[in-house]
């Protein structure tokens, strides 16, 4: 079965999917198809798009590409979620670093400064709850800089953790205005004090 790249017309996430030949013909004519979106959590309209191309041969210097705003560290084991969150935050002038694991995030936090840390809770192995406990114990300057994302609205364990941590949080599918507001509140608290 042939595949094509499509883009959700609501959240602009892209994915490669398999289609019937009739569906491919419809996409080629510019017809929008209804498909379930993992981020929107409802069927949305999808349009055909060109596949991602190779990076340009001579990219701009990193300093020319970075917004001048606060620096946010995103942590999620789902690449699509990271891509969507990065796009939203960069559009609002945040500098964004991303890690696909809690351990990868900690490696960045040791050497770089972040104004806010946004982490998924459920990740393989060293998850968001363990990350937070590590931060409280060994990186207390980030204790009040963390917010969590979760799609788990029913687990008593997750709800108890969120309550005890005192950290702001947002449920998936993400309300981006709410997310941006909570990140802005974390940033407004001022820079974390350096470790001694």
Image (tube, rainbow, N blue to C red):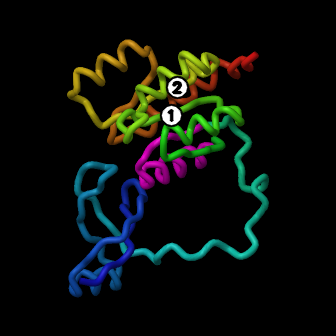
Is 5 or 99 nearer to us in this picture?
Answer: 99
Q: Is residue 120 magenta?
A: no
Q: Residue at x 63, y 41 (%)?
A: 94
Q: Is residue 135 above or below residue 35?
A: above
Q: Quadrant of residue 22?
A: bottom left
Q: Secondary structure at mark 1?
A: strand
Q: Is residue 1 above or below residue 146?
A: below
Please state the horizontal and vertical placement of residue 27, each as a whole percent of the image.
32, 80
Q: Residue at x 35, y 14 (%)?
A: 163
Please state the horizontal and vertical placement of residue 193, each as a whole percent of the image.
72, 17
Q: Quadrant of the N terminus?
A: bottom left
Q: Secondary structure at mark 2?
A: strand
Q: Decide: marks 2, 1 in contact (CB < 8 A)?
A: yes
The disc label shown at residue 118, or none: 1
Is 32 or 179 nearer to us in this picture?
Answer: 179
> Disc 2 or 1, which lies upstream in sequence?
1
Q: Distance between the Cα atoms at labels 2 and 1?
A: 6 Å
Please state the horizontal and vertical placement of residue 178, each as a whole percent of the image.
44, 32
The disc label shown at residue 146, or none: 2
Q: Is residue 87 above or below residue 119?
A: below
Q: Quadrant of the C terminus?
A: top right
The magenta segment is 73-93
Q: Residues within 10 Å of mark 1 (few under 14, many from 20)?
A: many
Please state the horizontal and vertical placement of residue 66, each as a whole percent of the image.
71, 50
Q: Residue at x 75, y 56 (%)?
A: 62
Q: Is residue 113 left or right of residue 155?
A: right
What kind of secondary structure does the magenta stretch mostly adopt?
helix
Is 165 or 30 nearer to us in this picture?
Answer: 165
Q: Residue at x 72, y 19 (%)?
A: 195
Residue extending furthest front?
A: 125
């Amino acid at each position: 079965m042939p595949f094509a790249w499509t883009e959700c017309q609501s959240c602009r996430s892209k994915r490669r999917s398999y289609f019937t030949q009739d569906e491919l013909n419809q996409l080629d004519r510019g017809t929008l198809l209804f498909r379930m979106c993992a981020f929107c959590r409802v069927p949305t309209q999808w349009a055909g798009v060109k596949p991602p191309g190779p990076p340009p041969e001579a990219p701009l210097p990193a300093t020319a590409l970075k917004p001048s705003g606060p620096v946010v560290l995103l942590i999620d084991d789902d690449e699509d979620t990271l891509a969507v969150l990065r796009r939203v935050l960069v559009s609002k002038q945040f500098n964004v670093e991303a890690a696909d694991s809690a351990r990868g995030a900690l490696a960045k936090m040791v050497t770089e400064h972040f104004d806010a840390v946004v982490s998924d809770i459920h990740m393989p192995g060293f998850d968001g709850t363990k990350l937070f406990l590590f931060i409280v114990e060994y990186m207390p300057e980030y204790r009040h800089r963390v917010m969590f994302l979760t799609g788990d609205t029913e687990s008593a364990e997750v709800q108890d953790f969120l309550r005890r941590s005192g950290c702001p949080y947002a449920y998936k599918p993400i309300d981006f205005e709410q997310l941006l507001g909570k990140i802005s509140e974390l940033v407004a608290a001022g820079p974390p004090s350096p470790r001694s």
